[in-house]
Image (cartoon, rainbow, N blue to C red):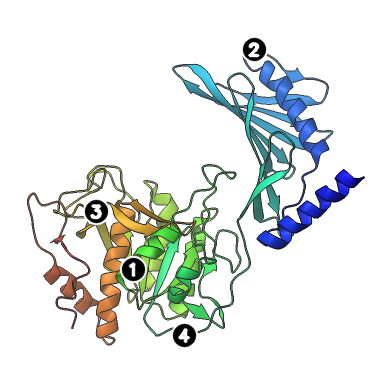
Amino acid sequence: MKKINLLLLSLILTILLTGKSYSISNNEEFIKLKETHDIFCKNLNLSEFKSIGNNWKLEQKNKYFQLFTNKNAQQTLQIKPLYRSNQIQKVIFTFYKIPKRPFIEIRSNKNCVIQSIRKITYNHKLIPNEIHSINISNYKIDNIKYLNPKLPKLETKNRKNIIALIDTGINYNLKRLHKNIAVKNKKVLGFDFWDNDERPFDSDPRQSPFYPRHHGTTVFSVIAKDAPNSFIAPYRFPALDMCKFKELVEHIADNSIRLVNLSMGSNNLKDWICFEKSVSKFKDIIFVVSAGNNGFNIDEKPIYPASLDLENILTVTSSDQSGRLGRGSNYGTNSVDFILPAERLEVIDHRGIKVFTGGTSYAAPRLVALISRYIENNPNCTNEEIYNFLKKRAVQKGKKLTKYGWIPDPLDNYLIN
């Protein structure tokens, strides 16, 4: 009894001292899942099997994954072996609850030894809320990663010169970002068109919902550093329904935003048809987009929206400090307008830590920041004046790779005043 009381006291003190509310996981749940994992893992190398036990039924199988359903528990299990030289090196077990939402992932090595366990929780709207890293030995929560945290209280202090950032969202809980976040009615100005709520938090779960990628925060930090007086409205792009770009662009227009950063793209034009139609209706809004990092000429192999032929889209690629094309950066004398130095840039990542990165995703915000500083000093300027300003700043160096050339120092205020 004393041991239990001491354990509870220790847990209470941990919560009070750290400000974190780590709850204890349901051990029985994980014990059952581990038993299922062990049975499947031991049978993984069998060439043919229709079921494991009485409950699990094989629905689909190929070299890359196996899919089972458990009707009694209303669960689906996907088993994905990861190969190296045709040998299994790692196995990922993902458990889904009905409807098809992943809730537990177990990763093990080729010998079926569990290496990590993660669990996703959902809010009342079935939006992913938290990722729990589970201790393998006792099934308690080691760490919590938030996916949809509450918005901070921010003061409205915007000027008219606001930049829209369309990306994976930002970590709006980082206080060092607050001074540059655009605010409306004491809330973050922007929207999450992925989850359809007012919390555009930085998360991209497409590759793995248990290990989401982060991108928008680093792009935000480049704009904030190069244009310190700017206010930035973060939008989480509508990955699940790309035609929501119509609503997104209209939201930007309704808030009188005239400058947009879009550091993303794909080679599928169908994904961007709704975006193209919307952008063409709002010709006063300038969209600066990244050329992509495939290492080829996008005049010949189009990347969208970078290759769209619209007068209010500026496409940017990356160079090193000497003007040489960045490694893997796309180019094209028709599709790409400018090249800017954006290799080995210091940025603030999703954790709030300074790191170095580079590529066309970061050339775009450098050009956006330059335009923002020009608008700040010339608030009544037209788009045509902005384009002429950029063309005058650009120089041709070496082999022609872009339409207008290289802007060697986007931090220089030459021709702005």
Q: Callout 2: helix, strand or loop?
A: loop
Q: What distance separates the C-alpha of mark 1 from that of mark 4?
A: 18 Å
Residue 69 image point, x, y percent: 74, 31
Q: Is residue 306 visible?
A: no
Identify which amino acid the numbered label 1 is placed on.
Lys
Name the residue rendered at 24%, 53% in the picture: 318
Give the left or right position of residue 122, taking residue 348 as reference.
Answer: right
Q: Callout 3: helix, strand or loop?
A: strand
- Give the residue at mark 4: 157
**Tags 2 and 4 in contact by the CB under 8 Å rule?**
no
Of the 4 image quadrants, the one containing the C terminus is bottom left
- Give the residue at mark 3: 318
Q: What distance separates the C-alpha of mark 1 from that of mark 2?
A: 56 Å
Give the mark nearest the N terminus, 4 or 3.
4
Identify which amino acid the numbered label 2 is placed on.
Leu
- Give the residue at mark 2: 46
Which image quadrant is residue 112 in?
top right
Which image quadrant is residue 201 in?
bottom right
Q: Is residue 66 above or below residue 16?
A: above
Give the mark nearest the N terminus, 1 or 3.
1
Q: Is residue 130 above or below residue 39?
A: below
